[in-house]
Amino acid sequence: RLRRPVHAIYAFARTADDIADEGEFNNEERLQQLNALKHDLDLIGNGKLPQSELMQRLNREAIIPFKMPLAPFYDLLSAFAQDVTVKRYQNFADLVDYCRRSANPIGRMMLHLYGETDSRSIAQSDGICTALQLINFWQDVALDWRKGRVYIPQDDLARFGVSEEQIAEGRADFAFQRLMNHECDRAFHMLKAGSPLGRTLKGRIGLELRMIILGGLFIIQKLDACRYDVFNQRPQLGRKDWWVIVKRAVQKK
């Protein structure tokens, strides 16, 4: 029932993310393309026809039939534009604010499609989405470094005595392990705090959300198991993990 609007939302988010990250465009060209999507959103907000086929599809298959608020779409574009120009975060609050716009909107969009818009569900969804974004950052420290980005807050690097030169060298010493354990512990508690939503939501969305939460928890466990050496092995889920995840998600309904 919701496949078409979900596909339309995914196409929007994937396209905007790729504009910020992929290809050989310079920063000015990336921002121009993102601004073109923002202009189309403005047109939709004013009841006019957007210019691009991508945005026409989003409007036709998701925004109009489900009366979707536009704020989450604007938030995503804001986060992607920030990716173009901001490569470091001074503190955890700055990073969470980025996650508020880069990750949380997706959860809010899905809840809106399913008609679950109470404040508790939204708050739990925000916690899950931010935690998953953070887990992805800690999983991809080495990958992000090659893109010129460091998502580990500068305050935390200084606190645990880890330098960017050490990240460049790929040295997962005791100081780096303590730092990553600290970051993963914060993500773990955020994910657990939001996890009751997976049991509140009924049917397929609840099952899928429980699987997503378990997947995030499994990645944290794998990060701990490899002693946070993300430079030599990127923790990821395998076939056996998914069998366990599906089993546990079904049992927890």
Image (spheres, rainbow, N blue to C red):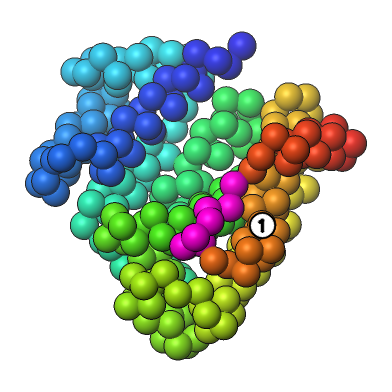
Vertical comparison of 41 with 167: above or below = above
Q: Kindly identify the residue that appears in the image at 72 percent across and 46 percent down.
A: 214
Counting from the top left corner in percent of width and height, residue 208 is at 70, 32
- Answer whether residue 57 is magenta in the image: no
Quarter of the figure that contains the N terminus: top right
143 displayed left or right of 203: left
Residue 152, located in which quarter of the rendered image?
bottom left
Residue 34, located in which quarter of the rendered image?
top left
Which one is in front, 60 or 127? 127
Counting from the top left corner in percent of width and height, residue 201 is at 75, 34
Q: How many labels does the image show?
A: 1
Determine the main secondary structure of the stretch shown in magenta. loop
Vertical comparison of 134 with 91: above or below = above
Q: Kindly identify the residue that appears in the image at 30 percent across and 36 percent down.
A: 18
Q: Mark 1 points at which residue?
A: 222
Counting from the top left corner in percent of width and height, residue 202 is at 78, 29
230 displayed left or right of 49: right
Vertical comparison of 226 with 247: above or below = below
Which one is in front, 153 or 75? 153
